[in-house]
Image (cartoon, helix red, strand yellow):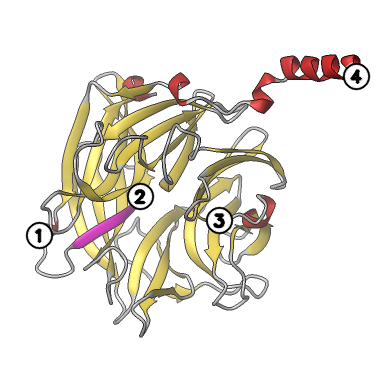
Amino acid sequence: MKNIITWIACLICQFPLAAQEQRADTVPTVVAATKESQILLSHKQFADKQYLAFPALIQLPNDEVLITLKRGTAHGNDREAVCDIIRLSTATNRVTAHQTIGSIADRKFQITVPLQTPDGKLHFYTDLQHTGPDGRHYREGMLYTTSEDDGKTYKPWTTLNLVDGVEYAYPFDFVIDNNVIYMLAMSFGYRPGGRWSVAVLKSEDAAQSWTFVKNITEALGDIAINESAFLRTADGFAVVVRGYHDQPTQIAKFDKSFNLVSAKDLTGTGILEGLIGWPRIFSRDGKLYVLGRIRLPGTAFMQLGLLRVNAENLAIEQVALLDNETGTLPVKDGYYAGFYWTEKDGATWLNTVTYRSVANDEYPDIVRLAFRWEEVQ
């Protein structure tokens, strides 16, 4: 018996991390000393459909960024919402064009995710919804449009074909690996195919057709997840997934065939409360970063945050607070964000584009928040 106890004690000494959660007091939080804040599009510019939300963007090689957004009347229970797009000059930080590119009676363009294929064509995939007789919102099949002139004109919106009999409705993210395009998207159990899942699809013909690759929901143990993002790594892929309700947001490593290697909770560990809204993931200088809507323990309101994550063990190394840094500003809605990079005054800047409504604001605005990378990395 004594030998058994000694053996167990030795195992605990050799593998202490397996029996311990990451402690919140070991993770530093930082606030940038330098911050640029700019309203790109104000709800006050419109007489109707003033609810501006859910920006998604793509950085073009000609010092421009295209930003899609929802323009409706509410976060989710409105009857109708359009997809608008603005063109931003990264040289002047001025909006140079604004147009509506998606509008269907009694339908909502909730969030529209852009993609530029290797042939230079722009694609836009939208989460199309409608409000049912019960007042709840329901998905429809994913719509997409294309542009061959850098987003000046657009083809008619088309419904994405079923993939192996399953309809995918909610686009999350895209990764291009050589000439293979991967899409991360969600299917819904009440739609064709009857499957609740977040899945990886791929295209080898410049997004003309898609095939099924992996059910990420199933790979992670059939946990309840929705909004997700991913990126290519040296060994495979990193995926971040937002949970529903009590399911924590997770980050996971997959091999090149999307077989699960490891996964770790990002929320519910004492470091972050609740969920990470619309998480975006990127890699820089050997580290993983997750951008999204967060809330630190003890804070009353949502915040925009940037997590630095160890690429090997997936532990949170740092939390940079990008907006509502103290958590005391009464932000009612906001902080789904996209990002792009610029160089200025000899420094690299992380630019985020998000939406935000505060205190007595009736509707959110689309805002740009920019930071010196050295201060938040």
Considering only vertical position in the picture, is 1 above or below 124? above
Residue to which mark 3 is pinned: 183
Q: Secondary structure at mark 1?
A: helix
Mark 1 Cα shell of 10 Å, populated few (<14), some (14-19), many (≥20): few
The answer for how far apart the CA atoms under marks 3 and 4 are is: 55 Å
Q: Secondary structure at mark 4?
A: loop
Q: Which mark is residue 57?
A: 2
In this figure, what is the number of numbered marks? 4
> Which mark's residue is nearer the viewer, 3 or 4?
4
Contact flag, marks 2 and 4 (Cβ < 8 Å): no
Residue to which mark 4 is pinned: 1
The answer for how far apart the CA atoms under marks 1 and 2 are is: 21 Å
> Which mark's residue is nearer the viewer, 2 or 4?
4
Q: Which residues are magenta?
A: 51-56
Q: Which mark is residue 45?
A: 1
Who comes first in sequence, dot 4 or dot 1? 4
Who comes first in sequence, dot 1 or dot 2? 1
Contact flag, marks 4 and 1 (Cβ < 8 Å): no
